[in-house]
Image (cartoon, helix red, strand yellow):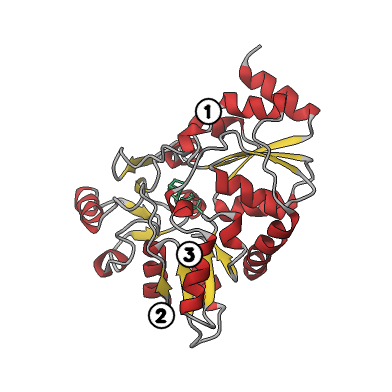
């Protein structure tokens, strides 16, 4: 039987949903019941009635869903799929940083392990980071991690000062101001949609550039849907173009570079999804105490919006 049919049958039998991030390979996106950015997928994990969630994304994403939904079984089709940001900080180093800044409020990107979330005051995603930081009292010390590019972008857009952890997404860090300038010159009629994990995201001339917009992946989709423009340059992981093209058949999407590929996301396969549904492979298990401590900063984030 075709693997897609098998997946659909097993999904029904197990009362399961498949959710996937826009960076998952196109064939994985195409079998998903829900697609989203990190914030949207957290909300889906919190709201679905399904008993089982198969998470088409890297490990920290499935783990975040398991933290949010303890009553559900959550599976990662590629449990070894990592993330350079999540790998850049561990709980012991974060505890040391906190000791050096007593009273500092820790804001962590969701691209972190459960152990790091357990040491965090507020989580955020690229979609709500500005809102989360703006919700904190004026004048408080903010320790932001692990993405220094997103952190620098938030400092520029909010005017708030923060101490930044020295981590990067190695996929987005190669997107420089020069690449964006070149795209703007080459495609003057296009809107340029940039992910704030890019290393250009705090560059003054890029921030103030005409037709240059910073968004999470879902924000890019919303922009392209609403815009009257015909052409868009996309400065994020290239498989985001799969949904952009599907949703907007009359519009043209150009990757800022074809090399912006997250190899870890490509470890998520249809075979991996089948393994979760058929054999219960890749189940995320969390110790209850750790899960509860990791849930608090996620809950605070979801309450802010
Ligand atoms: P968003 O989908 O929230 O924009 O996140 C991008 C990302 O790099 C996820 O790993
Ligand atoms: Fe992590 Fe970057 Fe890959 Fe997202 S694109 S999973 S932040 S390495």
Q: Position of residue 220 (x, y in %)?
A: 45, 52
- As helix, strand or loop, the secondary structure at mark 1 comes to helix
133 and 148: which one is in front? 148
- Seen in the picture, residue 108 relative to 233 is either above or below; the reply is below
- Seen in the picture, residue 267 relative to 194 is either above or below; the reply is above
298 and 11: which one is in front? 298
- Regarding residue 131, the answer to whether it shows in the image is no
Using the rendered view, name the quadrant where residue 202 is placed: bottom left
Please tell me which residue is depicted at 32% across the width and 59% down the height of the picture. 211
Please tell me which residue is depicted at 39% across the width and 52% down the height of the picture. 169
Using the rendered view, name the quadrant where residue 56 is placed: top right
Lower sequence index among marks 3 and 1: 1
Q: Which residue is mark 2?
A: 161
Query: Of circles 2 and 3, which is in front?
Result: 3
- As helix, strand or loop, the secondary structure at mark 2 comes to loop
Could you give the CA–CA distance between mark 2 and mark 3, rounded to whole angstroms?
Answer: 21 Å
State yes or no: Cβ of the residue under disc 1 lies below 8 Å from any atom of ligand 2: no
Q: Which residue is mark 1?
A: 27
Q: Which residue is mark 3?
A: 93
């Amino acid at each position: 039987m075709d693997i897609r049919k098998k997946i659909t049958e097993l999904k029904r039998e197990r009362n399961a949903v498949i959710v996937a991030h826009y960076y998952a390979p196109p064939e994985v996106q195409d079998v998903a019941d829900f697609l989203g950015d990190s914030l949207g997928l957290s909300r889906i994990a919190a709201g679905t009635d399904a008993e089982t969630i198969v998470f088409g994304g890297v490990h920290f994403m499935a783990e975040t869903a398991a933290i949010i939904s303890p009553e559900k079984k959550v599976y990662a089709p590629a449990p070894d799929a990592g993330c350079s940001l999540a790998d850049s900080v561990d709980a012991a180093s974060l505890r040391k940083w906190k000791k050096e800044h007593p009273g500092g409020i820790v804001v962590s990107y969701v691209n972190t392990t459960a152990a790091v979330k357990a040491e965090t005051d507020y989580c955020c995603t690229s979609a709500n980071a500005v809102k989360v930081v703006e919700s904190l009292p004026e004048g408080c010390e903010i320790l932001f991690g692990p993405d220094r590019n997103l952190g620098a972008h938030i400092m520029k857009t909010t005017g708030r000062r923060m101490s930044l952890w020295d981590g990067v997404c190695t996929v987005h860090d190669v997107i420089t101001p020069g690449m964006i300038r070149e795209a703007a010159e080459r495609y003057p009629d296009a809107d340029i949609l940039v992910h704030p994990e890019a290393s250009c995201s705090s560059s003054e001339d890029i921030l103030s550039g005409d037709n240059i917009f910073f968004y999470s992946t879902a924000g890019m989709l919303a922009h392209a849907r609403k815009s009257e423009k015909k052409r868009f340059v996309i400065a994020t992981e290239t498989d985001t173009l799969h949904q952009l093209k599907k949703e907007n058949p009359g519009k043209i999407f150009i990757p800022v570079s074809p090399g912006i590929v997250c190899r870890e996301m490509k470890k998520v396969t249809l075979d991996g999804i089948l393994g979760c549904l058929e054999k219960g492979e890749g189940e995320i298990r969390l110790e209850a105490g750790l899960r509860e401590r990791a849930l608090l900063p996620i809950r605070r984030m979801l309450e802010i919006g």
